[in-house]
Image: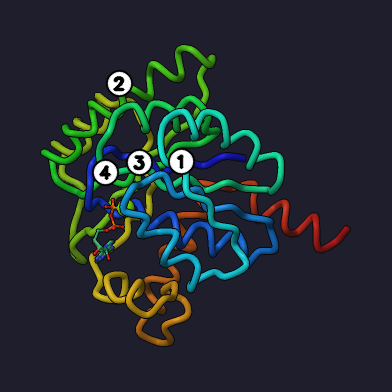
Amino acid sequence: MIIAIANSKGGVGKSTIAVHLAAWLREQGYRVTLADCDAQQSSSEWAKEATPTTRCVRLADADEILDQLPVLAQECDFVVADGPGSNTETSRALLLRADLAIFPCKASLLEVRALAQATNVLRQAQDIRGGVPKAAIVLTMVGKHYRLTQDMKDAAATLDLPVASTALIQRQVYADAPGQGAVVWKLGSRGKEAAAEVDAVFGELLPGVRTLLVKRKSA
Ligand SMILES: Nc1ncnc2c1ncn2[C@@H]1O[C@H](COP(=O)(O)OP(=O)(O)O)[C@@H](O)[C@H]1O
Ligand SMILES: [Mg+2]
């Protein structure tokens, strides 16, 4: 399965989600490849330390993405593709190959509206591919006491995308994690709440994964 982290806007939490998702899947025993499709290569640098048994591959452009993602997917259980902070062609290529697209989005009306551009590309891919990839929004860097306003709900509704019911809260521990070369659940008690919320988000986005794990363990 190919999972793309795909908001073509910078600084919304894509690499944070990509590295945590790759590590989360890896710790459940899956063979995971992180495909770093961002020229800044921040997620592959971080993942090398945070999840050393995850294979990291850098894909430089849209052609490499289109050519290599299916090959990588053959060789493992999950490919987590971290998207770039700009470049529509790269995003398009990702959405033409992904089975699931996760759109991290900051919880502001302007940010949700800005997602419209990315979701246009998503619709084109879904149109070509008969509804694939499935997609969902994950709200990121959300204030602790934040509540989704009606404006935001309306804006999300016009995008016609489900919003994960768990949001990622703005927490210092997420910002510290790359410098520690770690994921939040490796950062002790400081990372406890963050660990619980990423687990909840991934469990919600990939409901089959834990079922598979149970099946594997009992097999
Ligand atoms: N939930 C969060 N709370 C606090 N800081 C965060 C959170 N998610 C990401 N960050 C920080 O925000 C910045 C941008 O996140 P990043 O994952 O690199 O976004 P992108 O890959 O979309 O550019 C980074 O410094 C990261 O550590
Ligand atoms: Mg990034």
Helix, strand or loop under label 4: loop
- At a point 13% along the width and 36% down the height, the residue shown is 151
Q: What's the distance in space between the residues labelled 1 and 3, CA to CA?
A: 8 Å
Name which residue type carries label 2: Asn
The residue wearing badge 3 is 103
Q: Nearer the viewer, mark 4 or mark 3?
A: 4
Name which of mark 1 and mark 3 comes first in the sequence.
1
Mark 3 and mark 1 in contact (Cβ < 8 Å)? Answer: no
**Mark 4 beta carbon near ligand 1 (under 8 Å):** yes
Q: What's the distance in space between the residues labelled 2 and 3, CA to CA?
A: 13 Å
Q: Which of marks 1 and 3 is in front?
A: 1
Helix, strand or loop under label 1: strand
Q: Where is residue 120 in the image (x, y as percent from the top left)?
A: 30, 21
Q: Where is residue 131 in the image (x, y as percent from the top left)?
A: 51, 19
Name which of mark 4 and mark 2 comes first in the sequence.
4
Name which residue type carries label 3: Phe
Q: In which quarter of the image is residue 154?
A: top left
Name which of mark 1 and mark 4 comes first in the sequence.
1
Count of numbered circles on the image = 4
The residue wearing badge 2 is 120
Q: What's the distance in space between the residues labelled 4 and 3, CA to CA?
A: 12 Å
- At a point 48% along the width and 12% down the height, the residue shown is 128
Number of other residues with Cα within 10 Å of mark 4, as a class: few under 14, some 14 to 19, many 20 or more: many
Quadrant location of the N terminus in the rendered image:
top right
Name which of mark 4 and mark 3 comes first in the sequence.
4
Q: Nearer the viewer, residue 74 or 139?
A: 74
